[in-house]
Structure formats: structure tokens, C-alpha cells
Image (tube, grey):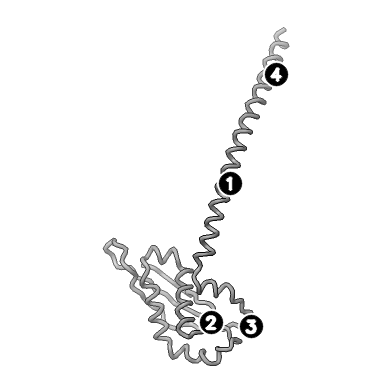
Amino acid sequence: MKKNLMSVIILALVVVNLVLTAIIMFSTVSANRKTIALVDDIAGILNLELESGAAAGEAAAEEAVVPPENSEVYDIADSMTVALRSDGDGKDHYAMCSVSFSINNQHDDYKTYQPMLAAKESKIKSEIIEVVGKYTKEEAQANVHGIEAEILAKVQEMFNSDFVYEAYFRDIKFQ
């Protein structure tokens, strides 16, 4: 009789466990669907911001697909130390950076403007200092690619050409 009673109790507990598991599953699945919908909405908004917030230079850099054999690198030889905008902590912050440019040597303007890069290097440095210097240390650290795109836009505007299709930091340090 004891074995029979134990079997009935175990069976009852299994049925209760099964019912509770089903209840938990239904409540969890509906909450999970809402979470997935929320994450999808947030991802969609972030994707829209990334697409609409892209700088003109960055968009041009993404559109300009230049094969490696048509690419040339122009390095600004000197490392630049740039005073960053104050962020209110009472300390002076600096960025030490080395910048390079990728140039399309098959571009129509290449023969005209490539020799002028060395001649206008001081003007290019001035533009780089202006762009980098308007950021605080935290902003600059968080937005290195945005700064590169802004430098590219300034250089393309300076030459009124997109034969320079990429600007990047070879080295950048913040203090």
C-alpha cells in the first residue's frame, strides 16, 4: 500500500511540475518576444543614425573602392602634438598623432595634385590641428574614425578633388 501511495504522490508531483513548467514557458516566451521586438527597434534606430549621421567624407571614402595596385600612401612625416579642447577638469590634454593619406594614382587629378601634397603639407597640418583640437580628450578617444573622416573632408575640400580617398592615423595617443 505504501508503494502505491508513493507512486500516486510522485505522479501528482510530476503532473504539477509539468503544469508549472508549461505556465513558465508561456509567460517567458511572451516576454521574450517583447524583448526581441524592443532589441530590433533599437537596432533599427541605431542603424538609421549610423546611416544618416555619416559625414560626407566618410560616405565618399566608403563609396571609393580603389584596388590596391591603384593606391598610394602619402605620409605626413612629422608627428603632431595638438592641444585638445578643455573638458573642465582643470588639466591640459593633448593628442599626439601621425597622419597618412591613401591616394588613387589612377584618378584624373592625381598628376595635378600629387606634387602639391608636399608643398601644402603645412596647410594640411594646420587643418589637422584645427579638426583634432576642437574635441575634448574623451570625445576624441570615442570618435577617432569620425575625426579621420573630417580630416579627409577638409583635404578633399582643399584640393577640390577626391583623389585622396582615405585619411587615417598611423599612431594616435592621448594625454
Q: Are marks 3 and 2 in contact (CB under 8 Å)?
A: no
Q: At x 59% / y 74%, what residue is drawn?
A: 63
Does dot 4 land on a helix, a strand or a loop? helix
Does dot 1 land on a helix, a strand or a loop? helix
Q: Are marks 4 and 3 in contact (CB under 8 Å)?
A: no
Q: Quadrant of the C terminus?
A: bottom left
Q: Residue 49 location in percent, x, y?
A: 51, 60
- Which callout, 3 or 2, points to the residue nearer the camera? 2
Read off the residue under disc 1: 37
> Is tag 1's residue or tag 2's residue first in the polypeptide sequence?
1
Q: Is residue 56 left or right of residue 128?
A: right
Residue type, mark 3 in image: Glu
Distance from the alpha carbon under mark 2 to that under mark 4 = 77 Å
Distance from the alpha carbon under mark 3 to that under mark 2 = 18 Å
Image disc number at residue 69: 3
Q: At x 63% / y 83%, what residue is drawn?
A: 69
- Which callout, 2 or 4, points to the residue nearer the camera? 2
Distance from the alpha carbon under mark 4 to that under mark 1 = 39 Å
Q: At x 54% / y 84%, what residue is drawn?
A: 163
* On screen, residue 6 above or below 95: above
Residue type, mark 1 in image: Ala
Residue type, mark 4 in image: Leu
Determine the residue located farthest toward the left in the rendered image: 90
